[in-house]
Image (cartoon, grey):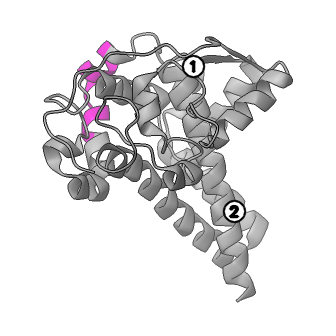
Amino acid sequence: MRTLLIALGAGLAVTFIANVATTVYLHRALAHKALTLSKPVRFMFRVVTWMTTGIRPRQWVAVHRKHHAFTDVEGDPHSPVLLGWVRVQVNNVALYRREASKPETVAKYAKDMPPDRWDKVLFDHALLGLGLGIGLLILLFGPVAGLLAAFIHVNLYLGGSAAVNAIGHHFGRRPYPNGAGNLQWLAFITAGEGLHNNHHAAPTSAKLAHHWYEIDPGWYVIRLLTWMRLARVRLSELRFAHERAPVTTGR
């Protein structure tokens, strides 16, 4: 029982760290340039992303930017309007990998992120990063708890990421006229990403909560970094985008 509790706590902690890196670093800082991070913080997030997810940032950014360019219409890499939300939830990893592996997608949508020497030496080697991450968990908590924590983290992180693309474009509140929804419970799980209707309404905003009753955990991390002068938010006000309405949608 003790081993299970340790594994659960460690798995939840690693997932939270990975979600913060995803939303603050990959999504808000890199994909939308909503904030600028200091070099040490940026490098720290690269390491964390590498060891907890194995994601290559330029691929993630390219896929996400293409999603915004073709939101819920033909060309969207993972639209539940086109594919059904259940299919996107179940096959999100495969849909992501299929798009991320296309050189033309990366070249077009992440041309500002050419690979550097660190990518070539370390960060492009996903299995090495994941292996080091799992090895660290085993070193800290023992082989059983460490491997179980890694298993819990993988399922929680992949499930939460899939839910943003699938459930977040099918269910939820829609204060703005776009096909995404706001789901506070999903925002808690994904460090703010569940406020997806807000994000599609104002994609360059570093803050995903637009009303007093909405909670964006990732924003608190950003506020801390700005207070420490380790980050700078680009826009102090919301700048709304005008996206094409989806063909059909569900609630």
Badge 2 is on which residue?
Answer: 137
Q: Nearer the viewer, residue 199 or 96?
A: 199
Q: Residue 5: x percent and y percent?
A: 70, 79
Q: Earlier in the sequence, mark 2 or mark 1?
A: 1
Q: Relative to 42, does residue 14 appear above or below in the rendering? A: below
Tell me if residue 115 is in the magenta stretch.
Answer: no
Q: Residue 230: x percent and y percent?
A: 79, 21
Q: Residue 228: name its quadrant.
A: top right
What is the number of callouts on the image?
A: 2
- Three-letter code, disc 1: Arg
Q: What residue lies at 50% left-to-right and 41% top-to-bottom?
A: 193
Q: Is residue 64 visible?
A: yes
Q: Which residues are magenta?
A: 98-108
- Three-letter code, disc 2: Leu
Q: Residue 58: x percent and y percent?
A: 44, 25
Identify the secondary structure beneath mark 1.
helix
In which quadrant will I find the N terminus? bottom right
Q: Which mark is residue 202?
A: none
Q: Is residue 122 visible?
A: no
Chief secondary structure of the magenta span? Answer: helix
Camera-near label (2 vs 1) is 2
Q: Which mark is residue 117?
A: 1
Cα distance between the residues tagged 2 and 1: 27 Å
Q: What residue lies at 60% left-to-right and 47% top-to-bottom?
A: 18
Identify the secondary structure beneath mark 2.
helix
